[in-house]
Image (spheres, rainbow, N blue to C red):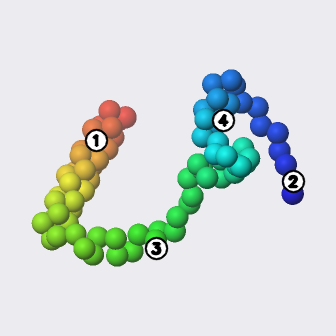
Amino acid sequence: MATRTVALDVEAYELLRMQKREGESFSDVVKRLAPKRRSFLDFAGAWKTLPKKEIDEVREILRRGRELDRARMQDLAKRMR
């Protein structure tokens, strides 16, 4: 197995060391703690059990966020002219 050397400052090393479980190597700790990339399809159907009211609330929040984004972009475009 190929290896790489990584330099850590003392604080980072101690944080990593504190996460280390018995029998784990530092490589094991990093692999366990590093976020895994998930497929977009992993989220398919995640909302199917939510009540309609909650889904409507989320949709309203998203709609308002898009409105704010649109307004910010328009304001930015005016400033750049």
Amino acid type, residue under disc 3 in the picture: Leu
> Can the viewer see residue 74 in this picture?
no
Q: Which mark is residue 2?
A: 2
**Looking at the image, residue 69 lies above or below residue 36:** above
> Which residue in the protein does label 4 denote?
17
Q: Amino acid at mark 1?
A: Arg
Which residue appears at 57% of the width and 58% of the height? Answer: 36
Q: Nearer the viewer, mark 1 or mark 4?
A: 4
Disc 4 element: helix
Q: Which is more N-terminal, label 2 or label 1?
A: 2
Q: Are marks 1 and 2 in contact (CB under 8 Å)?
A: no
Q: Which residue is mark 1?
A: 72
For the residue carrying disc 3, how many other residues have a C-alpha within 10 Å: few (<14), some (14-19), or many (20+)? few
Q: Secondary structure at mark 1?
A: helix
Amino acid type indicated by mark 2: Ala
Q: SS for tag 2? A: loop
Report the front residue among 19 and 23: 23
Q: Is residue 41 left or right of residue 37?
A: left
- Kindly report the distance in space between the C-alpha atoms of the residues bearing marks 1 and 3: 31 Å
Front disc: 3 or 4: 4
Q: Residues within 10 Å of mark 4 (few under 14, many from 20)?
A: few
Numbered tag placed on residue 6 in the rendering: none
- The label nearer to you, 1 versus 2, is 2
